[in-house]
Each structure stands twice: as structure tokens, then as C-alpha cells.
């Protein structure tokens, strides 16, 4: 037995990926509705307009969670259901609020602890149009704080809050490569707007400020009576040197994590950006004013960790191009010796390598002073799954093995390395709208038949987690 007695586990989802009902009960559009409508942005031309129809199937989803034995569920709230126009002077949509209040009541009734993500990429479109959304250093943090306060007030029973999901994705994929909404990039063949060298760093900065404002609001005005905890969720991959004999590759491994995770976590734990980023980005990286440092430093009750994969890292020489966001290095699937990091999946960026999970848990734990960690996402797609027959799909042994290996790596980090990990949410409860990849890539432990009324069929992996955690969580 290697996980603590109070360890929570379950599954994760995000509003735009599962809810559908994009116009129900007064919801306003988000930047993802707008982005999906642009031809060529989503692989299969789809959108989240219907998705898994979870907005209308809350009972079914809760029954599913219960049947799988989950003790926790991470989901996100659609900001534009709560405040359709997004801003602090815009009206609150009571129907949207009521939906989530009831959902949380029903989860608790079923014995499932909610982990609520306030923001999983679906910015109200009106704020993007009104003042440039994340790019606005004055307005955006204030509007986010206001939205967060509305939700904290409405849902006092929630004990676990996540401010932002993966701000790296919003910043880099949204404002450098243009792969995600709102699709800004310097590449004029993809977008008429954007500055890949500057905008991502501004966006990142403003998200950190918005996170910190929401945390302060929670701690000042809600935590004393509600007693919950709040933190941010960051994504990051494990890194191994392409050539372990080359100290420049070894150094580049840390630099890669600093550019992905340290970008957000260093300000939150230390009050400043990583030195490697300041050095490479110069004055394109914003600086924190003394008031901002005061606000941001210490603004995590726990560290939310999203983790999927690992890479070999090869340093680059010379001056990096201005739009470089990796830290002047290459990410590879093969080492110098020809070792492969892991088998292919349906996602071009994802190859399973469970030891990386243990190593990154240790890296984080050491760097940030042993924070309490919740793994808020971990999971895999499966090569060619979308083209298989249902009988094959539900026999997803590849995913069963992924979870088994990764959860055991985490348990080892907990028991042998002293990492303070207290929860695990598998990505994802069900197949869903996988952003720019549309519905072709499936991450669910439950198959969703989009052609037949979004019917749900639990796969083998869905049922594999309860026995796994039962065997690892201490009873006493
Ligand atoms: C995460 N990458 O996204 C998200 O939080 C989920 O909403 C998503 O469905 C899940 O992982 C699976 O993709 C990522 O390109 C998307 O490196 C892309 C990347 C990383 C994370």
C-alpha cells in the first residue's frame, strides 16, 4: 500500500469538450465557438456545439462516475454560461449558475468530491472582441476575479478550486502557433493578427495576475467560511537528455521544464520568472511590479499537475529565433543512441513513458518545496482507435496499461520519494471534443457514439482504475 488513506481519485473533463448545448439557457459564445466556425481550424470541421451533450445528461454522467467507483470528479465551468458577455459590469445569467449549483449538489449526494476548474480555455468571446481578452493587463484580471467571485459565492460546498487549466496552452497555442483559439500567430498564412514573439508572454503574464486575484478573493472573502483550497493547473512533460554525455543537453532538460512550467510556477512560488526565460526573452517578457509580486507570490494552496508524456531534449546553438518558445532546444522521440521514448498514440505529441511521471513529480516537489500535488489530468489516446469497431474499442488494453504504469509510478513517488501527491484525475471520463483535433482523437475511458445519440459505453480502462486504486490506497 503506497498511497495515503485520504487519497482521492476519479476522472476529469472540461466544459467545452463535453457539454454541448452551446445556446441553451442563455449561454454566450466563447472564443472556441468562434474559432471552430473558421474553416480549416478543426481537423474534422466539427465544434463543441453538441459534443457529449453532457449539459443535458448530468444524471447519466454522475451515474457513470458512481458505477466506476470514482471519489472525485474534475469538471470546468463555462464562463459564458455564468456571464454571457463575460465582464464585471455585464449581467449574470441565473440559469447558468443554477445548472452548476445543482450539478455540485448531485455530485456530493453521490459521494463524489467536485474539483472545479474555473477556466478551461473557453473565454467569453465578447471579452476578446471588447478589449483583446487575455492581452489586456488591466481589464482581464478584474473580469476574471469578478467571474470567480460569482461562482465562489454560488457554490460554497466546493472544496477544491482550480483557477486556470494549462495557461501554457492558452498562451503558446493560442498566441504563438495559432493552433488553438483565438488563433493568433505571426504566420500570416494562418491569421491576419498576432505577434508570436510578444503576445504569448503578455498573455501568460495576465493569466498569472488573474489567477492571483481570484486566489486572493477566495482567501479573503470565501475560504474563511467555506474552508476550501485553490490552485492552478499546469501542463508539462518529462525531459531526458538526447545525449546524456553532453552537459548542454542535460541543462536544456531543465530549461525546457522552466519554459513550460517554471514560467507560471516560479512566479507563483518565488515571485519572479525563471532566469533562463529572462535571459532568452529579454524585455519581451513582462516584469512584475512590486504590487504584482506581493499578489502572485504564494498564490497556490496546491499544485495541479497535468502530465502525459516525455521527450528527449537536444540543445540548439546560436541565437534562437524570436518566436521560439521552447528555450532554444529540440524535442525528440529518439535519443542519440536510438532509444525510443515510447510507443505511438493518436496524438502527435504523446508517447507513454511512465518513469517520466515519477521523475517529474520529484522535480516539482524538489523545486517548489514539497507542495501538495493533485494530478488533475493524465491519460492517453490510442493509435487508430477512432477507426475500430466498438467490440475492439472497449478492449483498450493499451490504455489499461498506460494507467497501470503511470499510477504505479506515482505511487512509487509517493511511497519511496516522499512526494506529497493527494489526488489523481484521469483524462478523460469519456471521449470528447479534442480541440483542434475534433472528435477523431479519443481520450475517454468511456466510448461515446456520436452517430447514435451520444450513447456511452465504458471501456476496459474505465473499470480498471477502481481495483488499481483499491490495491494502492492505505486502509488505515
Ligand atoms: C490537455 N500539446 O491539453 C487539456 O487540458 C485537455 O483539455 C485535453 O483534452 C488533453 O490535454 C488531451 O490533449 C493538451 O500539444 C493539448 O502538447 C495539447 C498539448 C498538451 C496538452
Image: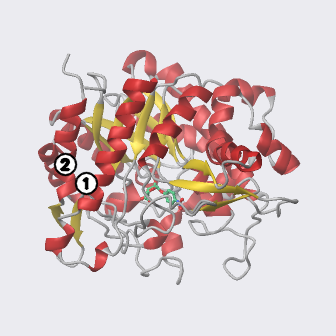
* Crowd around label 2: few <14 · some 14–19 · many ≥20 (10 Å): some
User: Residue 407 vs residue 265: left or right?
Assistant: left
Alpha carbon separation for disc pair 2 and 1? 7 Å
Q: Which residue is mark 1?
A: 400
What x and y, as percent, mark residue 440?
36, 75
Q: Is residue 313 visible?
A: yes
The answer to whether the residue labelled 2 contacts the one labelled 1, judged by CB atoms less than 8 Å apart, is yes
Disc ID at residue 464: 2
* Crowd around label 1: few <14 · some 14–19 · many ≥20 (10 Å): many
Q: How many marks?
A: 2
Mark closest to the chain's N terminus, 2 or 1:
1
Q: Residue at x 39, y 17 (%)?
A: 225
Q: Quadrant of the N terminus?
A: top left
User: Residue 224 vs residue 203: left or right?
Assistant: left
Disc ID at residue 252: none
Q: Secondary structure at mark 2?
A: helix
Is the residue at mark 1 in contact range of ligand 1, meaning its CB lies under 8 Å from it? no
Q: Residue at x 35, y 50 (%)?
A: 96
Q: Quadrant of the C terminus?
A: top left
What x and y, as percent, mark residue 441?
37, 70
What x and y, as percent, mark residue 353?
44, 52
Q: Secondary structure at mark 1?
A: helix
| Relative height, residue 437 to residue 444 (above, below) | below
Q: Judge by depth and name the residue closer to the eye, 427 or 200.
A: 427
| Relative height, residue 299 to residue 377 (above, below) | above
What x and y, as percent, mark residue 21?
31, 64
User: Residue 288 vs residue 70: left or right?
Assistant: right
| Relative height, residue 309 to residue 1 (above, below) | below
Is the residue at mark 2 in contact range of ligand 1, meaning its CB lies under 8 Å from it? no
Image quadrant of residue 146? top right
Q: Judge by depth and name the residue closer to the eye, 221 or 340.
A: 340
Amino acid at each position: 500500500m503506497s498511497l495515503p488513506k485520504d487519497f482521492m481519485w476519479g476522472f476529469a473533463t472540461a466544459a467545452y469538450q463535453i457539454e454541448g448545448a452551446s445556446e441553451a439557457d442563455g449561454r454566450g459564445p466563447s472564443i472556441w465557438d468562434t474559432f471552430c466556425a473558421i474553416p480549416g481550424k478543426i481537423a474534422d470541421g466539427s465544434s463543441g456545439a453538441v459534443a457529449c451533450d453532457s449539459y443535458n445528461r448530468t444524471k447519466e454522467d454522475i451515474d457513470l462516475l458512481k458505477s466506476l467507483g470514482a471519489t472525485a470528479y474534475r469538471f470546468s465551468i463555462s464562463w459564458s454560461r455564468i456571464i454571457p458577455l463575460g465582464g464585471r459590469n455585464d449581467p449574470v445569467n441565473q440559469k447558468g449558475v443554477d445548472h452548476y449549483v445543482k450539478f455540485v449538489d448531485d455530485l456530493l449526494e453521490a459521494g463524489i468530491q467536485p474539483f472545479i476548474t474555473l477556466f478551461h480555455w473557453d473565454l467569453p468571446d465578447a471579452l476578446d472582441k471588447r478589449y483583446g481578452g487575455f492581452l489586456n493587463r488591466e481589464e482581464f484580471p478584474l473580469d476574471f476575479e469578478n467571474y470567480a467571485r460569482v461562482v465562489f459565492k454560488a457554490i460554497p460546498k466546493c472544496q477544491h478550486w482550480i483557477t486556470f487549466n494549462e495557461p501554457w496552452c492558452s498562451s503558446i497555442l493560442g498566441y504563438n502557433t495559432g493552433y488553438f483559439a483565438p488563433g493568433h500567430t505571426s504566420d500570416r498564412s494562418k491569421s491576419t493578427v498576432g505577434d508570436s514573439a510578444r503576445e504569448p508572454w503578455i498573455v501568460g503574464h495576465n493569466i498569472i495576475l488573474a489567477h492571483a486575484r481570484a486566489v486572493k478573493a477566495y482567501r479573503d472573502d470565501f475560504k474563511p467560511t467555506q474552508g476550501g483550497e485553490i490552485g492552478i493547473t499546469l501542463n508539462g512533460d518529462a525531459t531526458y537528455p538526447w545525449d546524456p554525455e553532453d552537459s548542454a543537453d542535460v541543462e536544456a532538460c531543465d530549461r525546457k521544464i522552466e519554459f513550460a512550467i517554471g514560467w507560471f510556477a516560479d512566479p507563483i512560488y518565488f515571485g519572479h520568472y525563471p532566469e533562463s526565460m529572462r535571459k532568452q526573452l529579454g524585455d519581451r517578457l513582462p516584469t512584475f511590479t512590486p504590487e504584482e509580486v506581493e499578489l502572485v507570490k504564494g498564490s497556490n494552496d496546491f499544485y495541479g499537475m497535468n502530465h502525459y508524456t516525455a521527450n528527449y531534449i537536444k540543445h540548439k546553438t546560436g541565437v534562437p529565433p524570436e518566436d521560439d518558445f521552447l528555450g532554444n532546444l529540440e524535442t525528440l522521440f529518439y535519443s542519440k543512441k536510438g532509444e525510443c521514448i515510447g510507443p505511438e498514440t493518436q496524438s502527435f505529441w504523446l508517447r507513454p513513458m511512465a518513469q517520466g511521471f515519477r521523475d517529474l513529480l520529484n522535480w516539482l516537489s524538489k523545486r517548489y518545496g514539497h507542495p501538495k500535488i493533485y494530478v488533475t489530468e493524465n491519460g492517453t489516446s490510442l493509435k487508430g482507435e477512432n477507426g475500430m469497431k466498438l467490440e475492439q474499442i472497449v478492449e483498450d488494453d493499451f490504455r489499461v496499461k498506460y494507467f497501470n504504469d503511470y499510477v504505479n509510478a506515482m505511487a512509487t513517488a509517493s511511497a519511496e520519494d516522499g512526494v506529497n501527491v493527494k489526488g489523481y484525475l484521469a483524462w478523460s471520463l469519456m471521449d470528447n471534443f479534442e480541440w483542434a483535433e475534433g472528435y477523431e482523437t479519443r481520450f475517454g475511458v468511456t466510448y461515446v457514439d456520436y452517430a447514435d445519440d451520444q450513447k456511452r459505453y465504458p471501456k476496459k480502462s474505465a473499470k480498471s482504475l477502481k481495483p488499481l486504486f483499491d490495491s494502492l490506497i492505505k486502509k488505515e
